Image: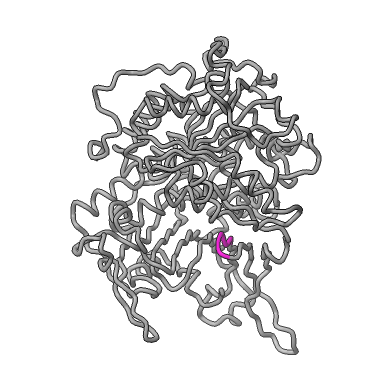
Amino acid sequence: MASQFGYCSSSSTTFTPSSFKNETHLSSRFNIVPRKSHSSTSISLIRLRIRPRKHFQLKSSSGHPLNAVSLQDGTAGVPLAKNDMEPQGKEESLPFSQSENVGPHLSITIVGASGDLAKKKIFPALFALYYEDWLPENFIVFGYARTKMTDEELRNMISRTLTCRIDQRENCEDKMDRFLKRCFYHSGQYDSEEHFAELNRKLQEKEAGKLSNRLFYLSIPPNIFVNVVKCASLRASSTSGWTRVIVEKPFGRDSESSGELTRCLKLYLTEDQIFRIDHYLGKELVENLSVLRFSNLVFEPLWSRNYIRNVQLIFSEDFGTEGRGGYFDNYGIIRDIMQNHLLQILALFAMETPVSLDAEDIRNEKVKVLRSMRPLQLEDVAVGQYKGHSKGGKSYPAYTDDPTVPNNSLTPTFAAAALFINNARWDGVPFLMKAGKALHTKRAEIRVQFRHVPGNLYKRNFGTDLDKATNDLVLRVQPDEAIYLKINNKVPGLGMRLDRSDLNLLYRARYSREIPDAYERLLLDAVEGERRLFIRSDELDAAWALFTPLLKELEQKKIVPELYPYGSRGPVGAHYLAAKHNVRWGDLSGEDS
């Protein structure tokens, strides 16, 4: 499968990067206070959050200011050449204050800047960080793509997607104008070293001889990742500070193609420079998962097979492919959602207590979980594909009605799977995943169903359905973020009538501030060198090892997915799969809104 992608040829010679591996590690700090503080030097236990626009000084892992960057092998940093220190050509005036003449410079290059992801997510996230003063004093944003465009045309394009959704402490339009003046564009081919050299000259002009840190965001198809990384490493990497690359999923289609992609990227990058982004790890409820478990005594003792009966990870969308049929048909719901988003959440949920909150300690524990799981087999899975449906006088299309999808496509748009972790904590506990498109509702949640109370004194009040007597913990990732615990409670009155009630933490009711978008958190983490929410290569290998045998079996045997109507609750096979493990899907009980 790797050969289909052609990430790099087998005859590629090993390239030993120089400046592109001048990666400097920022020490991880942690706290339990909000991410933002009005103090310019407040230190948090979750992580170091120095207000960059008040005071921004990057430090190496040794704690010393980043005036000279040390190489990973311990040799001295490469100084800028004289001609690199001097701006080339006439520099365009930037809206920087006098205080911005000191401190390191941050250059963010969005490769694939004309695409939907860049317009709808990345640029708005960067503006939100700028609005909230999370970016350093000296920063610029460059868009890079094949589309011919001027700086002003780029600014007009992205201005249509920038929103002033954050509390209005100052004139948002003025702030937006100042942000747009920091945005520039360079048109070029993705495999052209010459065009990246031209980008480098433009970056140097804006950096004006300052210590420069460069972040590249690859918002492009995976088959051109390596071309871009090669050209950027040879022609546009920082010669004085760090250079990092954010890589968007998909990370291959299976173990072989993923391994090939990793091998090719590491011809030009170290592992510490690669930030494999999974935006679900940046969602507020997912980041809060470990806080909920490890900082609340009421939950940690219950977090095992002794008290938990099953865990459900549910993702559903109430719309179809809608223009993404060509991309989606090459991957399917298992690769698109289950192998990354849901599996990452499962690993965070099930991991042992890490030694610390350091990124490597957390990722080590996640890898242990993934390696303890048995690879999925065909009997552990139910797959489906949505068909056309009419409801309320409106017709909904089938998946194969999409003109970019082959009429005989067998690509699943729905999948349910039962996974098991073979370790002492989770032995025998089914972890059920379910993901689908064109279903009856849009939601993403984690549901924990606890075991029945032994010798329950009130079991006769629940009749024969003992599932109604169990406690459920639900973390609703989207929409309307919430954490709620289902408990049994006596209905007020003279009789003894019980019902199920929710102890509910609804975020919009408890917290007045709007929750940041996942891309905001992950972009900020990449700038700060915080890798906790990014995927390491061995973690990726372990994830693909679980799903590759199943994916190959589905494709080789040409398994026909069960059809389900657009807007329904999914195929019947998912209910049989759950029943096989004595589980009832919690999102179909009708108790939740």
Q: Is residue 367 visible?
A: no
Q: Is residue 234 above or below residue 127?
A: above
Q: Residue 548, position in %: x, y?
A: 30, 45
Does residue 292 show up? yes
Find residue 306 and report its horizontal and vertical position in percent. Answer: 56, 55
Drawn side of residue 476 relative to residue 423, left or right: right
- Residue at figure coordinates x 59%, y 53% from the top left: 517
Q: How many marks?
A: 0
Query: Residue 478 sits in which quadrant?
Result: bottom right
Residue shown at the point (57%, 80%) measured from the top left = 462
Instruction: Decide which of 565, 267 is in the foreground and name it.
Output: 267
Q: Is residue 71 magenta?
A: no
Q: Quadrant of the C terminus?
A: bottom right
Is 3 left or right of 311, judged from the image as shown? left
> Which quarter of the rendered picture does the N terminus lie within?
top left
Establish if 242 lies above or below 512: above
Quadrant of residue 525 within the rendered picture: top right
What's the magenta bit mostly, secondary-structure-wise? strand
Q: Position of residue 584 (x, y in %)?
A: 45, 70
Relative image position of residue 213 (x, y in whole percent) = 57, 27
Q: Find the magenta span and give its range.
A: 475-479
Q: Nearer the viewer, residue 127 or 410?
A: 127
Residue found at the very far bottom of the displayed protein: 494
Measuring 30% from the left and 33% from the top, which residue is drawn there? 7
472 left or right of 589? right
Extreme residue in the right direction: 39
> Quadrant location of residue 489?
bottom right
Q: Residue at x 67, y 35 (%)?
A: 136
Instruction: Check the image and tell me how it is coloured.
Output: one colour
Q: Residue furthest front?
A: 90
